[in-house]
Amino acid sequence: MASAPQNPTAAAAAAALRVADLPGRGRGLVAARGVREGEVLLSEPALLLYPSALASLRAYCAACFRALPADSAAAPCASCRAAAFCSPACAAAAHPRLLCTALSHCASAGLAAAAPAEAVQEPLLFLLSAYSLPDPALRAVLSLASAPPPPPGAQDAADLHAAVAALAPPHLLPAGFSPDLTAALLDKDRGNSFAIMEPYRPWTPLELQKARAYAVYPRASLLNHDCLPNACHFDYPDRPGPGNTDIVVRALHDIPEGREVCISYFAANWRYADRQRRLLEDYGFRCECDRCQVESQWKDDDDDNNGDDAMEEEGEEDGADGGDDGMEEEGDADGDDDFPHAYFFVRYLCDSEGCWGMLAPLPPSPNEHLARTCVWRLPHLELFSRQKNGFDSPEGRNMYGR
């Protein structure tokens, strides 16, 4: 089995892409030169990392988010004693100061009381980590695109701001700390954070395959969506050495110079209606890619969908985001013209039962034949990152995304 691709130098990765203003799409990333299939297009360290929930503090290193050994060899944080580190180097790097302060002594009980459920813990952990950033990094987060207004029932920004103010000493908070700044940061988090997942293990129930942490990657956040993407992204959280939380983006096929590089924000086998609903609710736009233009002419398949049961479990609680593996049967009945993207599904989607991972070619090598590896069934049980909106619970999982 092939080993995981090594991180290229930042200069080599940066040379493959350039930022461009795209009509009707805003800023995006385009190929700065001709790109070969399997080539690493982007390898970027995180600007901001934060834990997914309080329960993960003892399971993963608070600095690099590698899995901690089960034999209790991890070193607890000398200040808060609630977090732990996998090595002296990570202990020296520490973790966000406001988060550490909130976890210290009796404050940890206050943090748990302020955020009793994981859905509430995540935005609070984000804010404590973001407000710990130095000013240049905080400004970089604020420069990212904002998400649409939060859906009904989302945690109120004013309540989260009050929780931060109650948990953090005033002298540690940055200048300009205000409800408006807190709301702006939450908008950036919803629209730009990637999930760093617990590696895929086929014997692990889907509901236990959760995010161990979230990360913000400024350059990767410029990747726009396409329902037939030409790139996909990976992470390697337990890889030894530096850069284990870097995001790695690889080309699915050859990309000519000047062509936009896109990823999919969710599983590629979702039905048209489910894709459009998710994009509109989470990102504020309707997709008009070539695939959507074809599928918009299909009859409504809600009544006769034969989607995979596993994908339906991964979808929304009401079953809206189900799989559409019945899509090929519908296309075959009407001819290839009604399903021109069938080749994409055959070549780039893993056919292992219940997987639906993207098959990405390994980086080109002059000494070996090109092979393909699934983003979900990677060597060493490593897993690609998943965008967090709507997935971090059994009711809503995004297999791909920003």
Image (tube, rainbow, N blue to C red):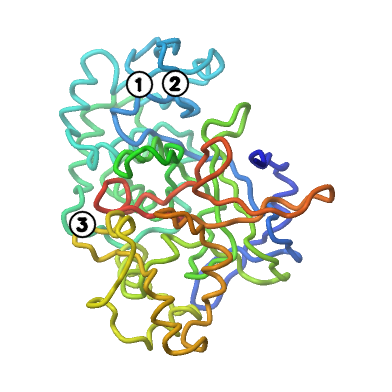
Choose top left, top right, bottom left or bottom right for residue 314: bottom left
Q: Find the distance from the CA under tag 2 to the CA under tag 3.
A: 32 Å
Q: Residue at x 36, y 59 (%)?
A: 147
* Residue 68 badge: 2
Q: Secondary structure at mark 3?
A: loop
Given the image, on which type of amino acid does mark 2 rest?
A: Leu
Foreground disc of the pair 3, 1: 3
Q: Residues within 10 Å of mark 2 (few under 14, many from 20)?
A: many
Chain-order first, disc 1 or disc 2:
1
Identify the residue shown where x is 38% and y is 40%: 211
Which residue position is annotated with label 3?
A: 317
Real-space Cα separation, disc 3 to disc 1, in angstroms: 29 Å
> Relative to 329, does residue 79 appear above or below in the rendering?
above
- The amino acid marked with disc number 3 is Glu
Horizontal relation, residue 49 to residue 389: left or right: right
- In x, y percent, where is residue 186? 33, 48
Residue 363 in percent (x, y) is at 71, 51
- Residue nearer the viewer, 270 or 237: 270
Callout 2: SS: loop
Instruction: Tell me if label 1 and label 2 are in contact, CB under 8 Å.
Output: yes
What residue appears at the point 45 percent right and 64 percent down from the top-left corner? 268
Quarter of the image with the N terminus is top right
Tell me the residue that label 1 is attached to.
58
Asked where in the image residue 396 lies, by quadrant, the reply is bottom left
Within-10-Å neighbours for mark 3: few <14, some 14–19, many 20+: few
On screen, 43 above or below 35? above
Q: CA distance from mark 1 to mark 2?
A: 8 Å
Circles 3 and 1 in contact, beta carbons < 8 Å: no
Is 363 on the left or on the right of 332, as rendered? Answer: right
Is residue 24 toward the left or the right of residue 161 in the image?
right
Q: Amino acid at mark 1?
A: Arg
